[in-house]
Amino acid sequence: MRLRSGLAAPVAVLIAVAAATYIAGEVIEVVVVRTRDAAGAVHDSTVWVVDVDGTPWVRVARSGRAWGERLRAEPHVELVRAGVTSPRLATIDTSAPTRARVDAAFRAKYGVVDWWYGVLVRSNPIPVRLDPAP
Protein backbone atom coordinates (compact mmCIF):
# COMPACT_ATOMS: atom_id res chain seq x y z
CA MET A 1 0.00 0.00 0.00
CA ARG A 2 2.88 2.34 0.77
CA LEU A 3 4.27 1.90 -2.77
CA ARG A 4 0.96 3.04 -4.27
CA SER A 5 0.82 6.18 -2.18
CA GLY A 6 4.46 6.86 -3.05
CA LEU A 7 3.54 6.85 -6.74
CA ALA A 8 0.61 9.23 -6.37
CA ALA A 9 2.71 12.41 -6.27
CA PRO A 10 4.89 11.60 -9.32
CA VAL A 11 1.83 10.52 -11.31
CA ALA A 12 0.03 13.74 -10.36
CA VAL A 13 3.05 15.77 -11.50
CA LEU A 14 3.15 13.92 -14.83
CA ILE A 15 -0.56 14.56 -15.38
CA ALA A 16 -0.11 18.25 -14.57
CA VAL A 17 2.85 18.54 -16.96
CA ALA A 18 0.88 16.76 -19.70
CA ALA A 19 -2.07 19.12 -19.21
CA ALA A 20 0.16 22.21 -19.21
CA THR A 21 1.93 20.94 -22.33
CA TYR A 22 -1.40 20.50 -24.10
CA ILE A 23 -2.66 23.91 -23.02
CA ALA A 24 0.49 25.73 -24.11
CA GLY A 25 0.96 23.65 -27.24
CA GLU A 26 -2.58 23.69 -28.55
CA VAL A 27 -4.57 26.35 -26.75
CA ILE A 28 -2.31 29.41 -26.34
CA GLU A 29 -1.63 29.77 -30.09
CA VAL A 30 -0.46 27.53 -32.86
CA VAL A 31 -0.14 28.41 -36.52
CA VAL A 32 0.47 26.50 -39.71
CA VAL A 33 3.53 27.15 -41.81
CA ARG A 34 2.87 25.80 -45.29
CA THR A 35 5.96 24.80 -47.24
CA ARG A 36 6.48 23.12 -50.61
CA ASP A 37 8.91 20.38 -51.46
CA ALA A 38 11.01 20.17 -54.65
CA ALA A 39 8.14 18.46 -56.49
CA GLY A 40 5.73 21.23 -55.49
CA ALA A 41 3.78 19.17 -52.96
CA VAL A 42 2.35 21.21 -50.09
CA HIS A 43 3.24 20.37 -46.48
CA ASP A 44 1.57 21.90 -43.41
CA SER A 45 3.56 22.15 -40.18
CA THR A 46 1.86 23.20 -36.94
CA VAL A 47 4.16 25.34 -34.81
CA TRP A 48 4.18 27.99 -32.11
CA VAL A 49 4.52 31.63 -33.05
CA VAL A 50 5.53 34.87 -31.37
CA ASP A 51 5.56 38.45 -32.55
CA VAL A 52 8.78 40.42 -32.14
CA ASP A 53 8.54 44.06 -33.18
CA GLY A 54 5.30 43.30 -35.00
CA THR A 55 6.71 40.46 -37.09
CA PRO A 56 5.82 36.80 -36.58
CA TRP A 57 8.63 34.42 -35.72
CA VAL A 58 8.65 30.63 -35.51
CA ARG A 59 11.43 28.23 -34.59
CA VAL A 60 12.59 25.02 -36.20
CA ALA A 61 13.17 22.74 -33.20
CA ARG A 62 16.45 21.37 -34.51
CA SER A 63 18.50 21.19 -37.67
CA GLY A 64 17.40 18.53 -40.12
CA ARG A 65 13.64 18.84 -39.50
CA ALA A 66 11.87 18.29 -42.83
CA TRP A 67 9.83 21.50 -42.75
CA GLY A 68 12.91 23.54 -41.88
CA GLU A 69 14.84 22.02 -44.76
CA ARG A 70 11.94 22.78 -47.11
CA LEU A 71 11.83 26.44 -46.12
CA ARG A 72 15.60 26.68 -46.52
CA ALA A 73 15.24 25.39 -50.07
CA GLU A 74 12.16 27.50 -50.83
CA PRO A 75 11.66 30.42 -48.44
CA HIS A 76 8.33 31.50 -49.98
CA VAL A 77 5.86 29.97 -47.53
CA GLU A 78 2.34 30.60 -46.30
CA LEU A 79 1.40 31.42 -42.74
CA VAL A 80 -2.05 30.33 -41.58
CA ARG A 81 -2.87 32.27 -38.42
CA ALA A 82 -6.32 32.62 -36.87
CA GLY A 83 -7.82 31.23 -40.07
CA VAL A 84 -6.13 33.79 -42.33
CA THR A 85 -3.59 32.63 -44.90
CA SER A 86 -0.86 35.06 -45.95
CA PRO A 87 2.17 34.64 -48.21
CA ARG A 88 5.44 35.07 -46.32
CA LEU A 89 9.15 35.12 -46.93
CA ALA A 90 10.96 32.97 -44.37
CA THR A 91 14.32 34.30 -43.23
CA ILE A 92 16.53 32.32 -40.87
CA ASP A 93 18.46 34.46 -38.39
CA THR A 94 20.70 32.58 -35.98
CA SER A 95 22.60 35.57 -34.64
CA ALA A 96 23.01 35.59 -30.86
CA PRO A 97 20.99 38.79 -30.29
CA THR A 98 18.11 37.46 -32.41
CA ARG A 99 18.13 34.08 -30.66
CA ALA A 100 18.00 35.81 -27.28
CA ARG A 101 15.07 38.07 -28.25
CA VAL A 102 13.06 35.33 -29.95
CA ASP A 103 13.70 32.80 -27.19
CA ALA A 104 12.65 35.37 -24.57
CA ALA A 105 9.43 36.05 -26.50
CA PHE A 106 8.65 32.32 -26.62
CA ARG A 107 9.33 31.96 -22.88
CA ALA A 108 7.07 34.92 -22.13
CA LYS A 109 4.22 33.57 -24.26
CA TYR A 110 4.40 29.81 -23.65
CA GLY A 111 5.89 29.78 -20.16
CA VAL A 112 7.46 26.76 -18.55
CA VAL A 113 6.14 24.53 -21.32
CA ASP A 114 8.56 26.23 -23.72
CA TRP A 115 11.36 25.02 -21.46
CA TRP A 116 9.77 21.55 -21.24
CA TYR A 117 9.55 21.21 -25.04
CA GLY A 118 13.19 22.25 -25.14
CA VAL A 119 14.08 19.37 -22.87
CA LEU A 120 12.01 16.92 -24.92
CA VAL A 121 12.51 17.83 -28.57
CA ARG A 122 14.44 21.02 -29.14
CA SER A 123 18.16 21.23 -29.78
CA ASN A 124 19.62 24.59 -30.77
CA PRO A 125 16.36 25.96 -32.22
CA ILE A 126 16.51 27.94 -35.43
CA PRO A 127 14.64 31.29 -35.40
CA VAL A 128 12.71 32.07 -38.56
CA ARG A 129 11.24 35.50 -39.31
CA LEU A 130 8.10 35.46 -41.46
CA ASP A 131 7.98 38.75 -43.35
CA PRO A 132 5.13 39.57 -45.72
CA ALA A 133 6.08 38.28 -49.16
CA PRO A 134 6.98 41.00 -51.67
Image (spheres, rainbow, N blue to C red):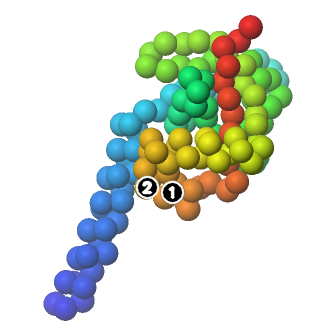
Residue at image point 54% right, 13% down: 85
Residue 53, compared with residue 98, is above or below; it is: above
- Residue 125: x %, y % from top left: 67, 48
- Residue 41: x %, y % from top left: 71, 20
Q: Is residue 125 left or right of residue 51?
A: right
Checking the image for residue 112, the label placed there is 2
**Dot 1, crowdedness within 10 Å: few (<14), some or many (≥20)?**
some
Q: Is residue 18 left or right of residue 68?
A: left
Checking the image for residue 89, the label placed there is none
Q: What's the residue type where badge 1 is placed?
A: Trp
Q: Label 1: state its secondary structure.
A: helix
Residue at image point 68% right, 29% down: 129
Q: Label 2: state its secondary structure.
A: helix
- Locate the C terminus and report the quarter of the image it occupies: top right
Q: Is residue 107 left or right of residue 86?
A: left
Residue nearest the viewer, comparing 74 with 95: 95
Residue at image point 67% right, 56% down: 123
- Whole-number angstrom distance, CA of label 1 to CA of label 2: 5 Å
Residue at image point 77% right, 23% down: 75
- Residue 122: x %, y % from top left: 62, 54
Checking the image for residue 115, the label placed there is 1
**Dot 2, crowdedness within 10 Å: few (<14), some or many (≥20)?**
some
Tag 1 and tag 2, C-beta contact below 8 Å: yes
Q: Is residue 41 visible?
A: no
How many tags in the picture?
Answer: 2
Q: What's the residue type where badge 2 is placed?
A: Val
Q: Quadrant of residue 88?
A: top right
